[in-house]
Every structure is written in C-alpha cells, then in structure tokens.
Image (tube, grey):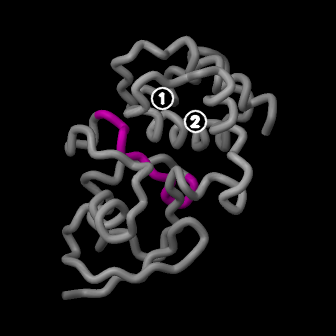
Amino acid sequence: MPKYNLHINGSQKSVETEADTPLLYVLRDYLELNGPKFGCGLSQCGACMVLIDGVAETSCVRPVGSIRDSKIITLEGLADNNEKLHPVQEAFVQEQAAQCGYCLNGMVIASVSLLRKNPNPNDSEIREGLELNLCRCSAHSRILKAVKSAAKNL
C-alpha cells in the first residue's frame, strides 16, 4: 500500500492507504481529526471543508493521492497553538452562529478562506463565499454577523 506524507496543521503526518482514498477519510479515520464532517459524500454540502493551500475545498471527493505538497489546515489547525481560537472561530462563538453544529466546520473554513481573499466583504459577497455550505438550522443571519465581526478583528 502506498505511503503519503501530508503537511497537516503545521506538521508532517504519514499514512498508508490507496491513492483514491478520500482525504476526508484519511483525516477522520487515520489522523483522528474530526472537525471535517461527512455530510453528502458528493462535494455538495460543505461539511467536509478544509483549507488546501489557503483555499476552502471539500475533502470528501478529493483523493489523498492528489494532495502532493499542499498544506492542509483543518478546523483543529486554525487555533493559535491550540490555545487561542482563530478570530473567525471566536466570532462564531460570540454570535452564537451555530445550532446543531454540523455545517459549522464548513462555514468557518469557508469564512477564513473568504476573509483571506476579501478582508471586508459585504453581505452579498459573504453569501457568495459561503454558497457551497448548507445549513438546515437557519443560522444564516448569525453566520453573516459572525463573518462581519471576524473581519473587524483580523
């Protein structure tokens, strides 16, 4: 079985698996990183998002063999040395921008990616930046407030 050396959350991790194993399975099953969630398995809900080289991408259909030298950051890797929450995470807590929490991983990851590209987005730009993430709990207004709040603190 092939061995893959992955750069995840600032450190190197090695896993042995088939090249077509979804990155999500490697993160959750091999590395016990449970921030990314299995939602649809079709790259349509955003629950499995991670940052790959700073860009939010779904991990449920991305084969681990395609990762190469990319730097991957999961929800767990956003916090500063696992002590201080990332400003986006903090804003989501302060604005109570989650109910069930299932979409939370993707919403936070997509928000971080959005704010890196556009540090002061308007409502329309935030909605567009988060459009690949589904939330069934109707926390959308609080999510918008959280992204705006985070933008002020970055």
First of labels 1, 2 by sequence position: 2
Main structural element of the magenta stretch: helix, strand or loop? loop
Residue 52 at x, y = what percent?
49, 58
120 to the left or right of 140: right
109 to the left or right of 83: left
19 to the left or right of 11: left
The image's mark for residue 111 is 2
Residue 1 at x, y = what percent?
19, 88
The amino acid type, in three-letter code, at marker 2 is Ser
The amino acid type, in three-letter code, at marker 1 is Leu
Residue at 71% x, 55% y is: 83
Residue at 27% x, 45% y is: 38
The image's mark for residue 130 is 1
Q: Are circles 1 and 2 on residues that touch, CB within 8 Å?
A: yes
Residue 151 at x, y = what percent?
74, 31
Name the secondary structure under disc 2: helix
Q: Quadrant of the C terminus?
A: top right
**Of 114 and 34, the residue lying toward us:** 34
The answer to whether residue 112 is above or below residue 140 is below
Q: Residues within 10 Å of mark 2 (few under 14, many from 20)?
A: many
Name the secondary structure under disc 1: loop
Residue 101 occupies which quadrant of the picture?
Answer: top left
The answer to whether residue 124 is above or below residue 39 is above
Look at the image and give the residue range highlighted in magenta: 45-54
Q: Residues within 10 Å of mark 1 (few under 14, many from 20)?
A: many
Residue 49 inside the magenta-drawn segment: yes
Q: CA distance from mark 1 to mark 2?
A: 7 Å
Residue at 32% x, 71% y is: 30
